[in-house]
Amino acid sequence: MMDNSLDTAWYSIVTDTGTFGIVITAAATLFYASKNSLRGPPTLFIVKERDDETPITLTWRKAILIPMLGSSMLLLLYIFFERIQFLYLVFNAAIAGICLEMALRPAVIHFLGPCVAKSIKLPYFGVTSTTSLISMMSATLLTLMWIVTANWMLLNILGVGLCTFMIAAVRLPNIRVGLFLFSALLCYDIFWVFFSARVFSENVMVDVATKTAENPVQVVADMLSIHLDHQLPTLSIPAKIMCPSYNHPGEFSLLGLGDIVLPGILIAHNLRYDRRVEESARNVHRKYFYYSLLGYTVGLVVAIVCSQKYHAAQPALIYLIPSTFGTTVVLGWFKGDLADLYYGFSLQKVDEPENLIQHVS
């Protein structure tokens, strides 16, 4: 017979607004970003021909660089954050705003494109469009509002923009490279969450994730001796999404953007593979995208529940990698697609079905 108090504790975590908000935001971001990945890599403001755009395809060397660069950045922020916080925050806000513009543009084109689409030639920028201008002004306004208010919802919007750009711009060629990448990232996550305290006397991952920086507008105003009506709030680095908890007022559930982007690269790969199979062989349908997205959602819920239940930071990738990569492999084994997934067909253009997939069952 199960303990009712235990049931209530687990149920209260799952139904809490913090958990629900994080899961819905992450899943919706992955769905939107994966759909955007079908359009090809995003461009920066200037209109380009699609043939000029080349996605960043992960290789073995690039895959091993990701945890190495991540570790270097963690150490840099852990040791020198007080000295570099102004420049780092301004740089991150600018990058987040640019990525948000590129993430908003497909939505603007979808809803307003037929009405306002028009090419415009701007000095120093080249040729752009009215839809790009609208998305740029919207992204700029949202970024400035976040800097002034430090609102958590605006921080999430910037985070969604960053995730959408990365998932659309970076391509996984096959699950063979994916297995290598996820194995390296799993080691990275486990070390910095569980063992960094033994080396640095505190959990480096948690320390960096919860740091706040002085508001750059406030810093500039103080330097110029400009009096503001009120003190501007400190800012969290736009490297996470967060949602307030109903069960614990004043507290937030947090999820690093890496825990969205890295599984998202695999989920976007699965969507491109589904499209490739469907267009290469009639009456054959694959649902790797939906099953891996469902697996991600389940894995994220388990990760949040374990973290809050045991009151300890959890490396989310421990749960997210098996739930997404494992789902892909198991489904591929049942469908007879493991060879195709292993060697990779997803990078071939969806609109060129002349090279048929050999192993479709």
Image (tube, helix red, strand yellow):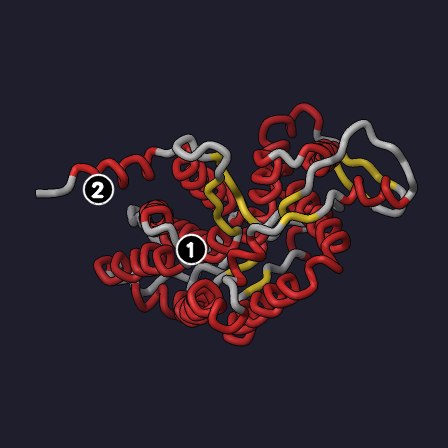
Could you give the CA–CA distance between mark 1 and mark 2, rounded to whole angstroms? 20 Å
Asked whether disc 1 touches disc 2, contact meaning CB atoms under 8 Å apart, the reply is no
- 40 above or below 355? above
For the N terminus, give its image quadrant.
Answer: top left
Residue 322 in the image: state x and y as whole percent: 32, 60
- Residue type, numbered disc 2: Leu
Residue at 56% in and 47% down = 164
Q: Residue furthest right?
A: 224
Within-10-Å neighbours for mark 1: few <14, some 14–19, many 20+: some
Residue 42 vs residue 202, the one in the foreground: 202
Q: Is residue 95 left or right of residue 277?
A: right
Numbered label attached to residue 285: none
Q: Secondary structure at mark 2?
A: helix
Within-10-Å neighbours for mark 2: few <14, some 14–19, many 20+: few
- Residue type, numbered disc 1: Ala
Residue 304 vs residue 64, the one in the foreground: 304
Q: Residue furthest bottom?
A: 61
For the C terminus, give its image quadrant.
Answer: bottom left
Numbered label attached to residue 313: 1
Residue at 76% in and 52% down = 86
